[in-house]
Amino acid sequence: MSTSLRKKPAPRRKPSKTYHHGNLREALIAEGLAALAARDQAEVSLRELARRVGVSPNAAYRHFSDKEGLLAALAAEGFRRLASAGASAAAQCSDPSAALNLYGRAYVDFALDNPGLFRLMFGGSISRNASDELARESAKALEQLRLGIALEEGLPPDDPRVGIATVYAWSVVHGLAHLILDGQIDGFATDTGRLIEAILAISSSAG
Amino acid sequence: MSTSLRKKPAPRRKPSKTYHHGNLREALIAEGLAALAARDQAEVSLRELARRVGVSPNAAYRHFSDKEGLLAALAAEGFRRLASAGASAAAQCSDPSAALNLYGRAYVDFALDNPGLFRLMFGGSISRNASDELARESAKALEQLRLGIALEEGLPPDDPRVGIATVYAWSVVHGLAHLILDGQIDGFATDTGRLIEAILAISSSAG
């Protein structure tokens, strides 16, 4: 796993002007993820991230042409982490149905652990085609779910039924994540983990 | 059906200072719903709505103490309309499972027809307890879904399994509505209506 896939953002670095190309981009992304964890994406600015890693705004603008470019890079990193978490979870079971269940749990957990990043990735404020990297990473994450569904259903991945079943499974975990994140189901369960398991159990009985 | 339940906001009225108590509140809500259909809730202001219905800001503040009060009233009206749409849809079928399916379709359609209002109602920016009216109307809308589930499952409404099945059914339609609204599944279907039907068919086979 490359360092860009690590779970937690890098610790705040001491101001330095000695970033190499690539290093600085990574540092800005780490600061951006930390900022998204603390506040709304509208309040994240490239200028402030530059200040936090100790470089001039111009140095930051050499890596991201504007704020949209930065947000696209953060969202792409989010899809990379989601795919990584999903793959690690699903790899725990060889049974396709159980693996899919673990994938669903990883999806909801990712949303609950990274609400700001999750909203950025899926909230529609940034287009999937905002950058080639984002288009590629989001497609890869979705393809992972589709392949899991194909395996479980015993159908080729390009079968239209697999497409429908993918949107269905995605809707369940996406809706559940939103309802929990947005405080909608507080009256339903004291133990969110058990609620998630129960919903995924119903979901995997469908088809 | 009272006028406050009608589907479309009232047409823009001519400026007038002759609102009776109640009339003005309704006029401000109608303007607020129209504003929510056109732009983000953050950009809706009580002052502007007052101007649009032709009264002073002070007159508007007699009905809503602040913007949060206005948003709570708009969200409450949204839950009233959602419950009304859901009840009308479900009433078309006596079979509980088919009725629940129609309810789900009405939920997704409501979200797609009223994205700004839907995000206000469920986006977590306003607490369910922001007003007694909002707490009551949102609880009623949810209770309606729970009763439909209880009927379909043949269980008493307060059975824990009904609670779980309610969150499950809600997750499916809520997630699907979000994925469509946020432009996530453009690659999956050219006919959104058929996709929704297919997802609801899978959903109703679960349990």
Image (cartoon, coloured by chain):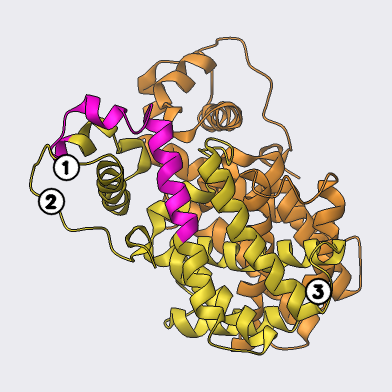
Chain colours: A yellow, B orange
Q: Looking at the picture, which amino acid does disc 3 mark?
A: Ser
Q: Residue furthest front?
A: A20
Q: Nearer the viewer, residue A72 or A111?
A: A72
Which mark identifies residue B204?
Answer: 3
**Residue for badge 2:** A13
Q: Looking at the picture, which amino acid does disc 2 mark?
A: Arg
| Circles 2 and 3 in contact, beta carbons < 8 Å | no
**Residue for badge 1:** A53
At label 3, counting other C-alpha atoms closer than 10 Å, the crowd grade (few under 14, some 14-19, many 20 or more) is some
Q: Nearer the viewer, residue B172 or B75?
A: B172
**What range of the chain is rendered magenta?**
A51-80
Secondary element at tag 3: helix
Q: Nearer the viewer, residue A157 or B197?
A: A157
Distance between mark 3 and mark 1 Cα atoms: 52 Å
Residue A131 drawn above or below residue B154: above
Q: Is residue B83 magenta?
A: no
Q: Looking at the picture, which amino acid does disc 1 mark?
A: Val
The residue lying at 43 percent from left, 53 percent from top is A77
Give left or right: position of B190 versus B155.
Answer: right
Can I make out residue A142 in this image? yes
Question: Are the residues under badges 1 and 2 in a single subunit?
Answer: yes
In percent of width and height, residue B125 lies at 41, 48
The residue lying at 23 percent from left, 39 percent from top is A49
Decide whether the magenta segment is chiefly helix, strand or loop.
helix
| Circles 1 and 2 in contact, beta carbons < 8 Å | yes
Of mark 1 and mark 2, the one earlier in the sequence is 2
Q: Chain of mark 3?
A: B
